[in-house]
Amino acid sequence: GIQVEQSPPDLILQEGANSTLRCNFSDSVNNLQWFHQNPWGQLINLFYIPSGTKQNGRLSATTVATERYSLLYISSSQTTDSGVYFCAVITGANNLFFGTGTRLTVIP
Amino acid sequence: GAGVSQSPRYKVTKRGQDVALRCDPISGHVSLYWYRQALGQGPEFLTYFNYEAQQDKSGLPNDRFSAERPEGSISTLTIQRTEQRDSAMYRCASSLGVGKSTIYFGEGSWLTVV
């Protein structure tokens, strides 16, 4: 099956710092989404981004489908950004597979 | 509804009992997915439906697990003869179309088997 790897696995930031999270996938995909799992366990959709670049406030994402990776940028991080960030891909079989996750801790 | 709704939110059951977890997807959503997430892990695919048809159940861990969506809307995930290793969060998600639209998750059902 498809492999979805995220890096780094853990990240600690000072409030106000910027960061880049990476998602690599091993095969062609029809869809890619980024999610934020907050400390209360809610899984919140951030971006639906099978290709190209999107921005939403302090967050932006870029997917280069031909090179099989996606990047999530967080600027001016806040403590509320803490949690686990997942990328997830949909394959030709229409299954959504999650990556290994990046655990982000933002300290004040 | 406004979002994907799951019930119960928390369930504690004794080993050997059967449990049924319910998912009410966003109105009009064709695709419905079930996932399991153990503590500290990412969500693991179980099964998915398009309308009432179960398209893929390859992620169901064994034959104690089953899912149905008889009218193409509400879905039920049933675990028979529960075991302690079944303890996890069970997440449901839905989307408008197959593989080409945003997938939205519910808040999950926490299952603890004692």
Image (spheres, coloured by chain):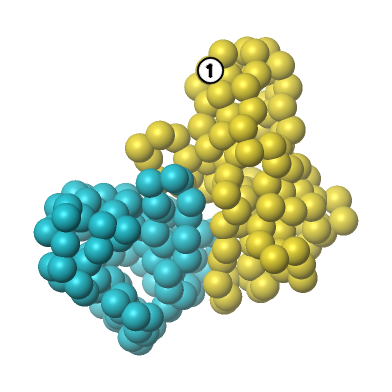
Secondary structure beneath disc 1? helix
State the residue at coordinates (82%, 59%): B72
State the residue at coordinates (41%, 53%): A37
Where residue A74 appears, as percent x and y from the top left, is 24, 71
Quadrant of the image occupied by residue B83: top right
Residue B14 seen in the current view: yes
- Identify the hue of chain B: yellow
State the residue at coordinates (68%, 47%): B6
Q: Outermost residue, front direction?
A: A108
Above/below status of A38 relative to A93: above
Residue B86 seen in the current view: no
Above/below status of A25 relative to B106: below
Above/below status of B13 relative to B30: above
Where residue A18 appears, as percent x and y from the top left, is 15, 70
The reply, left or right, for residue B26 in relation to residue A57 is right
**As shown in the figure, which amino acid type bears the numbered disc 1?**
Gln
Number of numbered discs present? Answer: 1
The reply, left or right, for residue A20 in relation to residue B80 is left
Quadrant of the image occupied by residue A77: bottom left
Subunit that carries the residue with mark 1? B
State the residue at coordinates (57%, 76%): B100
Where residue B95 appears, as percent x and y from the top left, is 64, 67
Q: Which residue is mark 1?
A: B84
Q: Which chain has been coloured cyan in this picture?
A: A
Task: Depth check: give the residue in front, B18 or A24.
Answer: B18
Where residue B103 appears, as percent x and y from the top left, is 56, 66
Task: Depth check: give the residue in front, B3 or A64.
Answer: B3
Quadrant of the image occupied by residue A65: bottom left
